[in-house]
Amino acid sequence: MHAPIEWLSWTGMHMSAWKVIGWVGALMFGGRWLVQFIATKRARKPVIPRMFWYMSIAGSLMTLAYFIFGKNDSVGILQNLFPSFTALYSLHADIRHRGWHRDRGEH
């Protein structure tokens, strides 16, 4: 997983599988704000859709895995460990409060 991905060598970038996981996780974690913005704009009130929590969990776990296994960086581990737990708790609270199959119109 640390070996360079050969088909990307023409770009001059060293990209390993772990780096791809880290990049996708970071993009997902950052992209959740776009999801929240679109949902708020559509509802014309502040909204945090469930997809925000799914993207938070996936993004923080992917970047956490990158920092644990790919980079072995304690700063990155600490930075991504806490958001993983808070996003999991927030998703659990959302499901408990609104139900698994909540009404799409109610936020």
Image: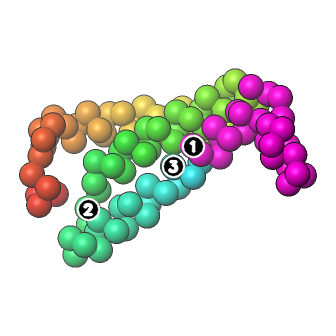
**Of helix, strand and loop, which mostly describes the magenta segment?**
helix
Residue bearing the label numbered 3:
29
Residue at (61%, 29%) from the top-left corner? 65
Q: Nearer the viewer, residue 75 or 68?
A: 68
Give percent across and percent down for residue 24: 59, 45
Residue bearing the label numbered 2:
47
Query: Is residue 45 shown above or below 86?
Result: below
Location of residue 32 (image quadrant)? bottom left
Location of residue 89 (image quadrant)? top left
Q: Nearer the viewer, residue 70 or 85?
A: 70
Q: What is the distance, in whole Å, between disc 1 and disc 2 at their CAs?
A: 23 Å
Mark 1 and mark 3 residues within 8 Å of each other at the beta carbon: yes
Residue bearing the label numbered 1:
25
Secondary structure at numbered mark 3: helix
Q: Is residue 63 left or right of residue 57?
A: right
Residue at (88%, 51%) from the top-left corner? 10
Query: Is residue 74 shown above or below 104?
Result: above
Question: Does any portion of residue 77 appear in the rendered image?
Answer: no
Q: Nearer the viewer, residue 86 or 65?
A: 65
Residue at (53%, 55%) from the top-left corner? 30
Secondary structure at numbered mark 2: loop
Is 48 contained in the magenta span?
A: no
Which amino acid lies under the numbered mark 1 shown in the image of this protein? Gly
Upstream in sequence: badge 1 or badge 2: 1
Magenta span of residues: 1-25
Residue at (36%, 33%) from the top-left corner? 88
Give percent across and percent down for residue 53: 36, 45
Query: Is residue 53 shown above or below 41?
Result: above
Q: What is the distance, in whole Å, between disc 3 and disc 2 at their CAs?
A: 17 Å
